[in-house]
């Protein structure tokens, strides 16, 4: 029996024991995790079976055909795409057992406390401090651009634990309970009218040392695992043809011949081809992930994602003419996820402006591609060997 045959057998056993039509959604998801069918490449006992990642499609196909519920991956994308692989690589056995199951089932939402008002593109310059007091760390500082902080139970957090060494070497990585005293979440209203992001203030927040990931002072290396996975999650999603932003504008072109011009046709064809190239490149990257951890290639995909979204949404507004200047709803809301295709052209145009900032600015990602993919000489960095406390701020 092949691994694929064994997975089909296990999946059918799960469906027989927990028929989707008669089983509560959460109960089914918990049973799926316990059966090792959540992410088959994870170890046994942690939602997986230690099998190749490529075999996940076997499980997914059986469950989709049976009408089984999924774990709403868009709502819990930070947990699935960023926290989980970091916990798996650097967490203790106790941390893995505590966090991974409710993370995957969606019972506990995660957010990311990395960026700060003075440390976004230069993340290693962060100033949030964590000071050791016995078995706890006392954390003070401010984080910003935090998706899902208003609904999150847990956060992945990096903080400065040693200001006397260069900035990359004095950072430690923690798991922060967002319900703890001293954690304050405030909405950040955006150009779209929504408050999809938040700023988070940390005042004397006590984090047990048992919720530290990795060694003290090794947080930058741990964070690289998170950031590499983040860029793949943003730029390397698997899409059908005309999935993503190119779909709505192509649909409008077909349905509204009265809006067409020769110039718009030439621009649309160029962007359609580029979107298809990016989609197929993302598919190839997804297949490469089967063999190991994501590398710097995700930075290139994220770069393409940001540029294409902005160019496509700009073309769509022009194509729609006066209608493209309309906006459906400026109501202040705090959504749990971003829906690019569920709103109008005006929303897509405004929201896509953030694509070249979030998940790493395009300027920083260009450096990553140049240095780590193309092997070009690194830019001179005069602050690499200077203690963080001595940096100009």
Image (cartoon, helix red, strand yellow):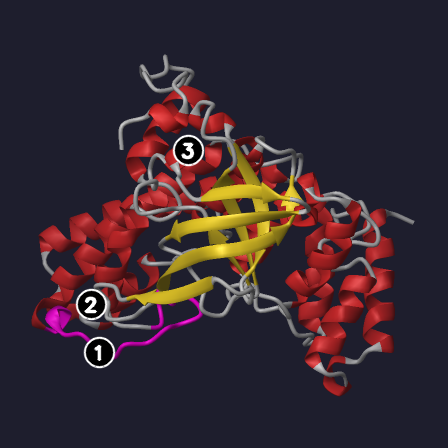
Q: Residues within 10 Å of mark 2 (few under 14, many from 20)?
A: many
Label pair 2/1, CB-CB below 8 angstroms: yes
Q: Is 270 contained in the magenta span?
A: no
Q: Helix or strand or loop: what does disc 3 sit on? A: helix
Q: Is residue 131 above or below residue 323?
A: above
Front position in the image: 82 or 204: 204
Q: Quadrant of residue 251?
A: bottom left
Q: Is 337 contained in the magenta span?
A: yes
- By secondary structure, the bulk of the magenta-drawn segment is best described as loop
Quadrant of the frame with the C terminus: top left
Q: Is residue 173 above or below residue 23?
A: above
Residue where numbered disc 3 is placed: 124
- Identify the residue shown where x is 42% and y is 60%: 147
**CA distance separating discs 3 and 2:** 35 Å
- Identify the residue shown where x is 33% and y is 30%: 366
Residue 147 can be seen in this image: yes
Please identify the residue farthest to the front as the structure is shown: 134
User: Is 299 displayed left or right of 212 in the figure?
Assistant: left
**CA distance separating discs 1 and 3:** 39 Å
Residue where numbered disc 1 is placed: 328
Q: Residues within 10 Å of mark 3 (few under 14, many from 20)?
A: many
Please identify the residue farthest to the top as the structure is shown: 377
Front position in the image: 58 or 21: 21
Front position in the image: 203 or 64: 203
* Residue 33 x, y percent position in the rendering: 76, 63
Residue where numbered disc 2 is placed: 346
Q: Earlier in the sequence, mark 1 or mark 3?
A: 3
Residue range highlighted in magenta: 323-342
Q: Nearer the viewer, mark 1 or mark 3?
A: 3
- Identify the residue shown where x is 62% and y is 36%: 293
Please identify the residue farthest to the bottom as the structure is shown: 22
Q: Helix or strand or loop: what does disc 2 sit on? A: helix
């Amino acid at each position: 029996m092949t691994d694929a045959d064994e997975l089909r057998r296990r999946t059918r056993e799960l469906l027989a024991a927990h028929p989707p039509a008669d089983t509560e959604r959460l109960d089914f998801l918990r049973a799926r995790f316990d059966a090792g069918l959540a992410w088959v490449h994870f170890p046994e006992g942690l939602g997986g079976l230690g099998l190749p990642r490529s075999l996940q499609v076997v499980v997914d196909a059986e469950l989709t055909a049976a009408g089984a519920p999924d774990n709403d991956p868009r709502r819990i994308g930070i947990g699935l795409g960023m926290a989980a692989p970091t916990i798996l690589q650097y967490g203790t056995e106790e941390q893995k057992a505590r966090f991974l199951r409710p993370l995957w089932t969606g019972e506990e939402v995660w957010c990311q406390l990395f960026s700060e008002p003075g440390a976004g593109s230069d993340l290693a310059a962060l100033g949030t401090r964590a000071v050791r007091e016995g078995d706890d760390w006392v954390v003070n500082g401010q984080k910003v651009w935090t998706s899902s902080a208003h609904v999150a139970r847990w956060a992945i957090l990096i903080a400065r634990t040693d200001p006397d060494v260069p900035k990359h070497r004095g950072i430690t990585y923690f798991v922060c309970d967002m319900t703890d005293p001293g954690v304050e979440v405030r909405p950040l209203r955006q150009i779209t009218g929504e408050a999809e992001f938040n700023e988070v203030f940390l005042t004397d927040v006590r984090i047990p040392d048992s919720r530290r990931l990795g060694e003290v002072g090794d947080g930058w290396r741990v964070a690289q695992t998170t950031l590499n996975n983040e860029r793949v999650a943003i730029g390397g999603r698997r899409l059908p043809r005309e999935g993503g932003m190119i779909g709505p504008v192509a649909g409008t072109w077909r349905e509204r011949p009265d809006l067409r011009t020769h110039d718009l046709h030439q621009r649309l064809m160029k962007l359609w081809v580029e979107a298809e190239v990016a989609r197929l490149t993302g598919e190839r990257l997804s297949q490469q992930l089967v063999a190991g951890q994501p590398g710097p290639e995700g930075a290139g995909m994220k770069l393409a994602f940001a540029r294409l979204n902005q160019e496509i949404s700009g073309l769509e507004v022009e194509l729609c003419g006066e209608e493209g200047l309309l906006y459906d709803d400026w109501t202040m809301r705090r959504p749990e996820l971003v829906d690019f295709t569920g709103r109008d052209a005006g929303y897509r145009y405004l929201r896509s402006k953030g694509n070249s900032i979030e998940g790493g600015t395009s300027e920083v990602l260009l450096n990553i591609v140049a240095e780590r993919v193309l092997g070009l000489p690194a830019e001179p960095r005069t602050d690499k060997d200077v203690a963080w406390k001595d940096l100009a701020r």
